[in-house]
Amino acid sequence: IPQKRKNIIRPLLAVDKKTVVEALQEQKIDFVEDKTNVDTAYRRNLIRHKVLPPLREINERVEQKATDMCAHLREDMQYLEEAAKAFYAENVGGASISIEKFLNAPKALSRRVAVLLYEAAGGCEMLESVHTDALFASLETDKHTFVHRFPGDVFVYAQKGMLVFSNVFQGDKLKLITENKDTAELYVNLLKELYTVDTNEYVTEKHITDDGEKVTYNSYKITAVSAKRLQ
């Protein structure tokens, strides 16, 4: 648990209970003990009452050692998060990034970049390792035909060598253009679980590259009605 996450601050996170109690007693401030603190049905209490006592017999400073280790890990995490923001600013356009750049970055960095991409696409829930692990597994096995639905209905898919994060709530309609029909069909099937899909068609489009070259390719265009969710 970080001491600060967005608008949540935990100033006493690194302070042990004994120090807090002594400070309260010195200032003659009454305090209340949460009755659930003795209930070992909760994992935190199970660790506190069953795991820590035998560890203290081995090392009486085990709690301080654990606190110090957490402080060091928070410092590492802060450094990685700042590095991820710099990488994001340099390599990300909107809510998409080159798959090659994403995979070539250290995984500790790209994992955090994925969180930033998720937030840029409108994701507002906690993205857990189970989500990023699934994304890495798909990228390492098949870089072109996968679609993942992250919390908050943020969809992640590959499009022309780019890793795209898309939130279907950004408008009344959403259009996905991808050269890979399999990816598009996966996307439609996921959308059908949440929305009524209006149209989906396979079309041919012509584009002109930055150097003036004309390129023609087949695309799969999907328009999904997102104003009304299926119940």
Image (tube, rainbow, N blue to C red):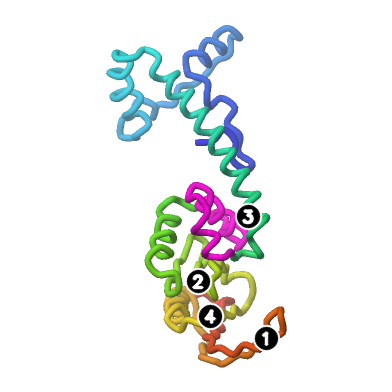
Pointer 4 residue = 178
Callout 3 crowding tier (Cα within 10 Å): few <14, some 14–19, many ≥20 = many
Q: Amino acid at mark 2?
A: Ala
What secondary structure do most residues of the magenta stretch adopt? helix
- Judging from the image, what secondary structure is the residue with disc 2 in? strand
Q: Earlier in the sequence, mark 4 or mark 2?
A: 2
Quick check: 5 left or right of 56? Answer: right
* Residue 132 on image: x %, y %: 45, 56
Determine whether label 3 and label 4 are within 8 Å by CB.
no
- Whole-angstrom CA distance, mark 3 to mark 4, is 23 Å
Q: Earlier in the sequence, mark 3 or mark 1?
A: 3
The residue shown at (54%, 86%) is 219
Q: Earlier in the sequence, mark 2 or mark 3?
A: 3
Tell me the kind of residue under disc 1.
Answer: Glu
Q: Is residue 106 magenta?
A: yes
Q: Distance from label 3 to label 1 (Cα)?
A: 29 Å
Q: Which residue is mark 3?
A: 88
Specify which label sits upstream in the sequence, 3 or 4.
3
Query: Residue 59 has which mark?
Result: none
Q: Tell me, yes or no, whether the two marked residues, 4 and 2, touch with CB atoms within 8 Å.
A: yes
Residue 151: x, y in percent?
Answer: 49, 60
Residue 231 visible here: no
Residue that mark 1 sits on: 213
| Mark 4: amino acid | Thr
